[in-house]
Structure formats: C-alpha cells, structure tokens
Amino acid sequence: MELDELRKMKTTVEDAARDVEHSIHTGASEFEKQFSGASGDTLSALAEPEQAVPEYRHPRKNWRLKQGATPNWYKARNGVRTKALSGAARVARFRPHKIN
C-alpha cells in the first residue's frame, strides 16, 4: 500500500508543478504582450537618446579673495606665508645667529 500512496503523491506533485509552470508562462506572455503594445513608441524613443553635452561655464572664482578672508591667527598656526620673502631672506631667517 505504501508504494501506491507514494505513486499517487508523485503524480499529484508533478501535476501541481506543471500547473505552476504553465501559469508562470501564461502570465509572462501576457505581460510581454501588454508591455510591447503599450510602450512601442517609448522604446523607440529610448533607443536613440540625444547626446546633450553641457556647455562649459567659467566658475568666476577668485582664489585670492578666498585666501584673504582667512583670519591671521589661523594662518599663523598653520604656517601659511602672509608676506613674500626672497630666497636669500628665507635662508637668513633659519641660519643660526653669529655670536660676537
């Protein structure tokens, strides 16, 4: 009796699997029909997009103004040069002093 029950269960499971597969295929084919019918025009528009390259605009920024707006105490702590020194003046600044 167990073999007969297993065979019946096997056939019922196989039938259920076929029904599920059939319903999935029919649902997918209906969706494809609706999608192709409703968006035929939109797909052709999406296939050839226009190449819109934005035109370059100069940012019109002045880095000197931005640098000048920084407070002096911040420049002093971070070692920002506020005064222009010549190369010889920079060397003389860090050279040890002569003792007389």
Image: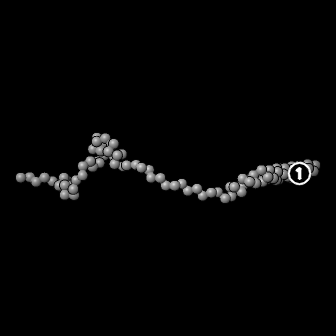
Q: Amino acid at mark 1?
A: Asp
Q: Horizontal and vertical percent for residue 64?
A: 34, 48
Q: Locate residue 87: give its quadrant.
A: bottom left
Q: Which residue is outermost to the left?
A: 100
How crowded is the residue under tag 1: few (<14 C-alpha within 10 Å), some, or many (20+)? few
Residue corresponding to mark 1: 15
Q: Locate residue 66: give its quadrant.
A: top left
Write the residue at 76% across / 54% down: 40
**Visible in this render: residue 16?**
yes
- Left or right of 38? Residue 57 is left
**65 or 96: nearer the viewer:** 65
Q: Secondary structure at mark 1?
A: helix
Write the residue at 86% across / 50% down: 19
Q: Horizontal and vertical percent for residue 94?
A: 19, 53
Write the residue at 75% across / 52% down: 39
**Visible in this render: residue 6?**
no
Write the residue at 77% across / 50% down: 38
Q: Horizontal and vertical percent for residue 15?
A: 88, 51
**75 or 96: nearer the viewer:** 75
**85 or 9: nearer the viewer:** 85
